Amino acid sequence: MDWTALELSLRLAGWTVAILLPVSILLGRFLAFRQFRGKALVEALVMLPLILPPTVLGFYLLVAFGRTSPLGQAWSGLFGQPLVFSFAGLVLASVLSSLPFAVQPAQRGFQAISPELREAAACCGMSPWRALWKVDLPLAWPGVVTAMVLSFAHTLGEFGVVLMVGGAIPGETRTIAIAIYDRVQAFDTGSAAVMSAVLVAISVTTIALTFALSARIGRRLG
């Protein structure tokens, strides 16, 4: 069992969830309540990482994060190290690849809120931010929690994007998914089986929690 790779994967997933939590709340709420021209295009762009092959997404991120790109040059100038093949680059890539898993469930959670409740909050003089904390979030929390659980699990098991952007540097970018691949390549099926079982256990727990929260949202919509 590669505990270093597992620890790095858990840390990567934790950072990804921490960054995506406010993004999912703000963007999910915006898409749930606002109607504007081009909304379908914005939703399509948010969902794009879900259907793109990981190698395609990873390739474009590798180009965007490279030393010659504006982002790569700015990062190197600020921190003195490249963005690609680093943990920071891995976090940013994971945030982008997990975006649909974070935004879509949160959006569904906000859409489940009765318009009458939001209108009542506005009539009581609540500001948009106060309504978010006092009305929207207490009612939409199942969707937000589902979004975070899915984002965590997706990041933990991501392979293609992680390999393209981060490579397989031990202790820096070598996640548990890459460690499993490396063990299979080395014909060490015993270690690969143990690490795979750990990921399966986490995935089953994630799916069970997601179904439970989705059922709660479904009852509210009904």
Image (cartoon, helix red, strand yellow):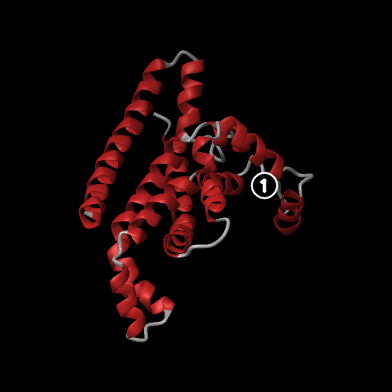
Camera-nearest residue between 11 and 207: 207
Position of 22 relative to 157 (above/below): below
Residue 133 x %, y %: 35, 73
Q: Quadrant of residue 75?
A: bottom right
Q: Is residue 76 left or right of residue 18?
A: right
Write down the residue under mark 1.
83
Residue 134 x %, y %: 32, 75
Q: At 40% from the left edge and 56% from the top edge, which residue is drawn?
A: 107
Q: At 37% from the left edge and 86% from the top edge, which residue is drawn?
A: 125
Residue type indicated by callout 1: Leu
Residue placed farthest to the right in the image? Answer: 68
Residue 177 x %, y %: 46, 31
Position of 120 relative to 50 (above/below): below
Q: At 49% from the left edge and 35% from the top edge, which residue is drawn?
A: 175
In the rendered image, the quadrant that contains the C terminus is bottom left
> Are there few (<14), some (14-19), or many (20+) residues within 10 Å of tag 1?
many
Q: Is residue 185 left or right of residue 205?
A: right
Q: Is residue 156 left or right of residue 113?
A: right
In the rendered image, the quadrant that contains the N terminus is top left
Camera-nearest residue between 10 and 122: 122
Q: Can the viewer see residue 165?
A: yes
Residue 194 x %, y %: 34, 25
Q: At 59% from the left edge and 49% from the top edge, which residue is drawn?
A: 88
Residue placed farthest to the front in the image? Answer: 37
Residue placed farthest to the top in the image? Answer: 187
Could you say whether the residue bearing mark 1 is in a helix, strand or loop?
A: loop
Camera-nearest residue between 81 and 200: 200
Q: Can the viewer see residue 95?
A: no
Position of 61 relative to 147 (above/below): above
